[in-house]
Image (cartoon, rainbow, N blue to C red):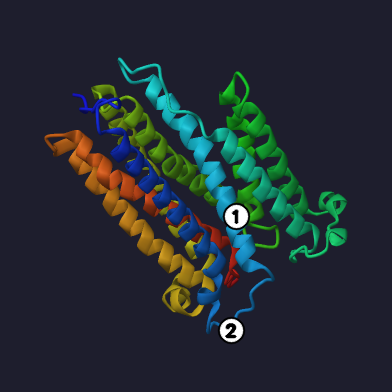
Amino acid sequence: MTLTRSNPGAAGEPGPRRRSAAVRAVAVVLLVASGALIPLLGPSPALHGTGEAAAPGVGGVALLRTVLFAALCVPVGELFVGRLARTVPGAPARLPRTWSGYAAGAGFLAALGLACVVATGNLVPRDPERIDLGGLYASRDGTLALLEVNAFLAAGLCAVSRRPGRQVWPLAAVVVAEALRAHPPTEQSPLLGSALTLVHLSCAALWAGGLPHALRTLRLWGGTEPGVALLGRYARVATALLAAVTATGVCSSLRRMPPQTVLEQLTTTAYGRVLLAKLFLMTAVAALALWARIRLRRAADPLTACSPARAEVVALGVVVAVSGVLTAVPVPIRW
């Protein structure tokens, strides 16, 4: 089974192909710009009318954390799908060009920006002289922020080395640091909360990062049978990842919002509103994933599953942006 591809050198073809590439480039720019507006503008509507006070620079923090999450998903997904590709019988040796180096650079800058926020007492660093980077070692949040900065730096160096697979260790350090940061010691059962976040973030990164790389690999392989097999293997694993993300997300939400207050807090708190938006988006993502899997298994041409899968990639990108907002708004802890 192969996709028919027209000859790039055919007469009259370069013009349409260039126009198609330009349209895709413009679409990508618009999607990135729209995605950046979600974390920048999201906290303000979420906080409106709740009576909760937003931390200074909450929009910027949400944007930096969104970039950090996206930078984590890209290399994790590449490593995951690359491992799946090696198990496909008859698979071509070629793989898409890696984006891990660029992702590590973006993650490093985002982590450095967040570390600067921590170094100024969780305030927007308007004056460089007030940034006490040395003081980061004296606090738990500062140590975790530095760990993320160094981990992305190490991941970038591994990505451009002869053994890019080693970046799994610094990426794992980022996940652990995020899990610990989200649950300070003052919280009840912080280790349980960190364990839930660890599983949630790991599975989400595999899912959100793996799908675009699987589609890129399928496109490079020309829609051959190994490409379809790879997409099918990813879909089977993604089902388990979706179940784990859903289960850990529900448990984490119930820890922050006790069952008897969930319905009220979903509309009266910023955290609840953003969580509700994420829930709607996850429902849409799950529907797209189911649609793609049905096409992959039952359609006469399994490659028709790529259309809902591409829509799923866009929806997952929005989920990542909303997740960045969720980490920046006040948490309605009720102990």
Determine whether, in the image, residue 19 is placed left or right of residue 139: left
Locate residue 129, reporting x and y percent: 88, 59
Determine whether, in the image, residue 146 is placed left or right of residue 205: right
Give the residue drawn at x 37%, y 57%.
Answer: 282
Pointer 1 local density, CA inside 10 Å: few below 14, some 14–19, many at least 20:
many
Q: Tell me the amino acid under the disc marked 2.
A: Gly
Q: Quadrant of residue 47?
A: bottom right
- Secondary structure under tag 1 reads helix
Quadrant where the C terminus lies?
Answer: bottom right
Q: Quadrant of residue 228?
A: top left
Pointer 2 local density, CA inside 10 Å: few below 14, some 14–19, many at least 20:
few
Q: Camera-side residue: 24 or 306?
A: 24
Give the residue drawn at x 54%, y 63%.
Answer: 39
Q: CA separation, marks 2 and 1?
A: 24 Å
Q: Quadrant of residue 100?
A: top right
The residue mark sitting in front, 2 or 1, is 1
Quadrant where the N terminus lies?
Answer: top left
Q: Is residue 189 above or below residue 270?
A: above
Q: Is residue 288 above or below residue 5?
A: below
Most distant residue in the left direction: 300
Locate residue 233, reporting x and y percent: 31, 31
- Secondary structure under tag 2 reads loop
* Sequence-first disc among 2 and 1: 2
Locate residue 89, reporting x and y percent: 30, 16
Q: Tell me the amino acid under the disc marked 1.
A: Arg
Q: Which residue is mark 1?
A: 65
Determine whether, in the image, residue 113 is placed left or right of residue 26: right
Determine whether, in the image, residue 148 is placed left or right of residue 30: right
Q: Which residue is mark 2?
A: 51
Locate residue 61, reporting x and y percent: 64, 61
Give the residue drawn at x 62%, y 31%.
Answer: 169
